[in-house]
Image: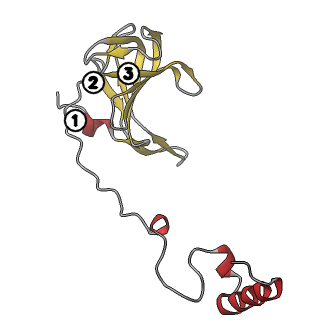
Amino acid sequence: MAFHPGIRRLVIAVFLLATGCAGLYSSNPRYGHKKTHPRLRPKPAPVHIADKRKGRLRWPVVGKVTGTYGIKVDPKYGTKTKNLGLDIACAPGSPVKAVAAGRVSFADHFMGYGKTVILDHGERLHSIYSKLEEIKVSVGARVAKGEVIAFAGDVLHFEVRKEGKSEDPGKWLAPR
């Protein structure tokens, strides 16, 4: 059924007067129904389920922790720095082992970290091993828990990231 052009303009004008310009551009007009489109409804916050691996990961290298996770204040200058992981002093050339099974997502030099390996353990959990002397794995390789992935210098810097955010590795590693 075709409308006369004059009637069509009149209907559009009445529509604009009733809804305002929002009626043309919004799925939630200023006037009219209050229901929102299902795609525009806010989504519920994700439920965080405790990761069963927390507190059970094996230590990546044998050594003494010399730098802990968190903000440090220099006693002389008062400057603040944040350590996103653990610094573990070890014998040069010590084997660095995977804390859990996973896939190598990065194995190369990383600015500020030196030679670095990043393992993806699934469910958005990653472990980062840096300040390495030699890398033994390549990107895409699958590694088993405890498999040697690299050799350390005199210090291994180790980080854990869950859902892209750094977390205290001490809470993820098993007690020694």
**Residue drawn at x 45%, y 69% as measured from the top left:** 41
Residue 53: assigned label: 1
Real-space Cα distance between discs 1 and 3?
Answer: 16 Å
Among numbered discs 1 and 2, the one appearing first in the sequence: 1
* Residue that lies at the very extreme toward the left in this rendered image: 176
Residue, disc 2: 100
Number of on-image labels: 3
Among numbered discs 1 and 3, the one appearing first in the sequence: 1
User: Could you say which is closer to the camera, residue 63 or residue 15?
Assistant: 15
- Mark 3, other Cα within 10 Å: few <14 / some 14–19 / many ≥20: many
For the residues bearing labels 2 and 3, Cβ distance under 8 angstroms: no
Residue 103: assigned label: 3
- Residue 155 percent coordinates (x, y): 41, 20
The amino acid on which the numbered mark 3 sits, given as a three-letter code, is: Arg
Q: Is residue 113 above or below residue 48?
A: above
Asked which quadrant contains residue 8, the reply is bottom right
